[in-house]
Image (cartoon, rainbow, N blue to C red):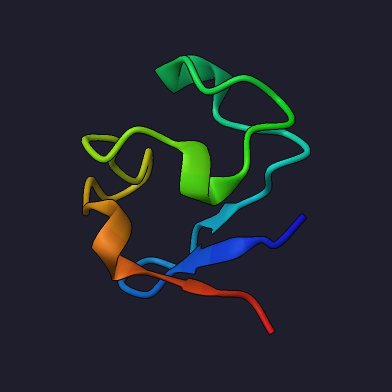
Amino acid sequence: MQKYVCEPCGYVYDPEIGDPDSGIEPGTAFEDIPEDWVCPICGVGKDEFVPED
């Protein structure tokens, strides 16, 4: 699955890990994360994330 990077802070969302602290289970694709989810580091929305190269 594709990893996504937060452009402002560099946090990498890894679908294999998810974001358990925010209720995102491991194995959750970025596209399947709720639209109101925010970066756990800097708080920006999903629209600030880009696919990792």
Displayed quadrant of residue 26: top right
Residue lying furthest front in this view?
A: 32
Q: Is residue 50 above or below residue 35?
A: below
Instruction: Quarter of the image for the C terminus: give it.
Output: bottom right
Q: Is residue 25 above or below residue 7?
A: above
Q: Is residue 11 left or right of residue 41?
A: right
The x, y position of residue 24, in whole percent, is 52, 23
**Between residues 43 and 33, which one lies in front from this camera angle?**
33
The x, y position of residue 44, in whole percent, is 21, 53
Q: Residue at position x 29%, y 68% from top?
A: 48
Residue lying furthest bottom in this view?
A: 53
- Total numbered badges shown on the rendered structure: 0
**Between residues 17 and 29, which one lies in front from this camera angle?**
29
Instruction: Quarter of the image for the N terminus: give it.
Output: bottom right
Q: Residue at position x 50%, y 58% from top?
A: 11
Q: Residue at position x 44%, y 36% from top?
A: 33
Q: Is residue 2 above or below residue 52?
A: above
The x, y position of residue 8, in whole percent, is 30, 72
Q: Is residue 45 above or below residue 52?
A: above
Displayed quadrant of residue 22: top left
The x, y position of residue 9, in whole percent, is 37, 66
Q: Is residue 5 left or right of residue 14?
A: left
